Image (cartoon, helix red, strand yellow):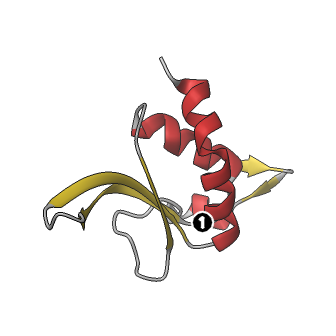
């Protein structure tokens, strides 16, 4: 919550982690190899913007529906950093 001695207003008001994914958020789809809690803890610790994390459904090439994990970020830079760090995040916490 405190980074560099300043409180994040979104955290103080409970607005950082959203329960629904807004359409303007940048989505990063991934295969979950550990728990959502470990991923969200990393996001809370390393990013400052709003985010959503959960499961999404998408159509496959064969016409069926599949489910995958997804994290979505309001700030495109955070989505880029998350996608670059995802393998290390999951490897670090993998048990």
Residue 55: x and y in percent read: 30, 54
Residue 1 appears in view: no
Q: Position of residue 40 (x, y in %)?
A: 51, 45
Q: Is residue 22 visible?
A: yes
Q: Nearer the viewer, residue 12 or 17?
A: 17
Q: Is 85 placed above or below 78 here?
A: above
Q: Relative to residue 61, is residue 81 drawn left or right?
A: right
Q: Residue furthest left?
A: 64
Q: Residue furthest front?
A: 62
Question: What residue is shown with label 1?
Answer: 10
Q: Name the element at disc 1.
A: helix
The residue lying toward the viewer, choosing from 15 and 64, is 64
Question: Which of 15 and 39 lies nearest the eye of the viewer?
Answer: 39
The residue furthest right is 4
Q: Is residue 54 above or below residue 26?
A: above
- Residue drawn at x 62%, y 53% is 82
Relative to 43, is 54 on the left or the right?
Answer: left
């Amino acid at each position: 919550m405190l980074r560099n001695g300043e409180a994040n207003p979104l955290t103080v008001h409970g607005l950082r982690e959203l329960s629904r994914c807004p359409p303007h958020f940048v989505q990063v789809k991934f295969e979950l190899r550990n728990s959502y809690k470990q991923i969200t803890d990393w996001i809370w610790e390393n990013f400052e913007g709003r985010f959503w994390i959960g499961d999404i459904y998408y159509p496959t090439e064969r016409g069926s529906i599949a489910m995958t994990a997804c994290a979505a970020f309001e700030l495109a830079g955070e989505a880029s950093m998350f996608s670059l760090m995802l393998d290390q995040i999951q490897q670090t916490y993998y048990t």
